[in-house]
Image (cartoon, rainbow, N blue to C red):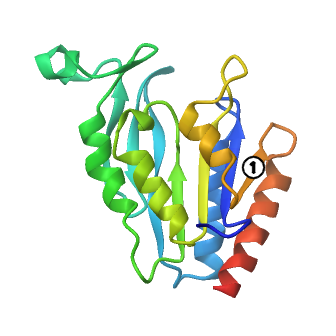
Amino acid sequence: MAAPGKCLLVTGPPGVGKTTLVMRVLESLRTSNPSLKIQGFYTREIREGTERVGFEVVTLDGRTGPLASTTNSRNGSPEALRWPNVGRYRVDVASFESLALPELQVKGDTDLFIIDEVGKMELFSSSFFPAVLKVLESNIPVLATVPTPKFGRDIPGVARLKNHPGAMLFTLNTSNRDAIREQIYTHLVNLLQKC
């Protein structure tokens, strides 16, 4: 089980900068300690002009694959028609699992896990949340993002993470982004020095 303060969760409304914050913290950690072994992934918007048409998964070593799309050429295939929907997006669970799940394998030399995000699309994978729980049980620090509750209710997996004894929740808004980023960076540096 993750010790108190080893699971840092960043939440906030869509577009507030959760992924940007995680990437800046990651950059700072890599600059200050290039030998850190960091595993994980983040999600990135796919845009056509000004319109968001989907999301892709990006591993920390730069591999990418589709997560969800409105325009995926495979959307017309019989297989894609069975993909779950989140709003106007179809979620490619198999693609997500092929990239994200290997990144959540606990290895002896891992110093930190980055998980962006634990949200509705990702939780369509029945293997994803158990992998996240194994990461938490490993006692290796985790920096993850989670969505804000919709209609006042969290997704059950997100609620479980927020209530985890090792979790610290940081709620991001446009006026506190820099302060939260510094706070998370400092907390992780202190944690990693103790490991």
Going 66% across and 21% down the picture, which residue do you hit? Answer: 150
Q: Position of residue 129 (x, y in %)?
A: 44, 46
43 horizontally vs 90: left or right:
right
Q: Which residue is mark 1?
A: 169
Q: Is 34 drawn above or below residue 9 in the view shown? A: below
Q: Residue 17: in sight, yes or no?
A: yes
Q: What percent of the width, then of the height, locates residue 119?
A: 52, 36
Report the front residue among 138 and 48: 138
Q: Is residue 97 left or right of residue 184?
A: left
Dot 1 amino acid type: Leu
- What is the quadrant of residue 69 in the picture? top left
Dot 1 alpha-carbon crowd within 10 angstroms: few under 14, some 14 to 19, many 20 or more: some
Taking the spot 25% from the left edge, 49% from the top edge, the residue there is: 98
Residue 71: image location, x then y, percent: 30, 18
On-image quarter of the C terminus: bottom right
Query: At 56% across and 72% down in the image, what residue appears?
Result: 140
Q: Is residue 167 left or right of residue 180?
A: left
Residue 55: x percent and y percent? Answer: 42, 33
Q: Residue furthest left?
A: 78
